[in-house]
Image (tube, helix red, strand yellow):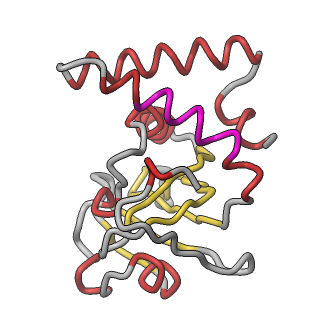
Amino acid sequence: MSGEWILSGREVSFQENEIIVSKTDLTGRITYCNDVFIRVSGYRERDLLGQPHKIIRHPKMPRTIFRLLWNALSQGQELFAYIVNRCHDGDYYWVFAHVTPDFDQSGQAIGFHSNRRVVRPAVLAEILPLYARLAAEEAKHEDRKAGLDAGSALLESILREKGRSYERFVCEL
């Protein structure tokens, strides 16, 4: 694993047959987390509930991917994405996330649901260089919004060259 993604020097793993599950309200505050999420993240349930989901955001994770996520969710769409998360103690773990809006009986979005699975090592060979490029582009700009805009433009350019959407790209890895 590339050292630039590591805070503590230790990657946490979970089993292929396990799924990390969480639910949030519309603002991204955690309303539910399963035992796998609790164990892998190293937090206690009471320390997660009510907190912004970004409590587990790894500082090297490109914000561009979260922009894609929030854009999709705000349009009532789901998104698949590879994400590196930070554990309570600074360890990290990679996931393949499927995030989708939760709707009430009348079709109103009431929150979000995320299922996360293990990432195959071969996939990281594709994702790590891409995410490193995006994070570097974002970091070139003192203004965070300008950095996010630049990272998003770079990702759009890369995907255009590949002739794929982000979701199609990640699902084909």
Residue 155 position, x and y percent, is 54, 21
Q: In the image, is residue 127 above or below residue 20?
A: above
Number of disc labels: 0
Which image quarter holds the C terminus?
A: top right
Residue 102: x, y in percent?
49, 58
Q: Residue at x 18, y 20 (%)?
A: 142
Q: Is residue 62 left or right of residue 54?
A: right
Main SS of the magenta part reads: helix
Residue 128 magenta-drawn? yes
Looking at the image, which residue sits at the far left?
142
Residue located at (32% from left, 86% from top):
45
Q: What percent of the width, then of the height, locates residue 126? A: 70, 39
Find residue 152 and report its horizontal and vertical position in percent. Answer: 45, 21
Which residue is drawn at the image coordinates 52% and 83% (left, top)? Answer: 36
Q: Is residue 158 above or below residue 66?
A: above
**Which of the 4 quarters of the picture holds residue 57?**
bottom left
Task: Give, as a single range, the part of the protein colored magenta.
Answer: 125-135
Left or right: residue 33 versus residue 169 is: left
Which one is in front, 34 or 100?
Answer: 34
Identify whether 156 is placed above or below 91: above
Residue 159: which quarter of the image?
top right
Relative to 51, 154 lies left or right: right
Q: Is residue 140 magenta?
A: no
Query: Residue 23 vs residue 78: left or right?
Result: left
Q: Quadrant of the N terminus?
A: bottom right
Taking the spot 47% from the left edge, 52% from the top edge, the residue there is 3
Q: Residue furthest right?
A: 172
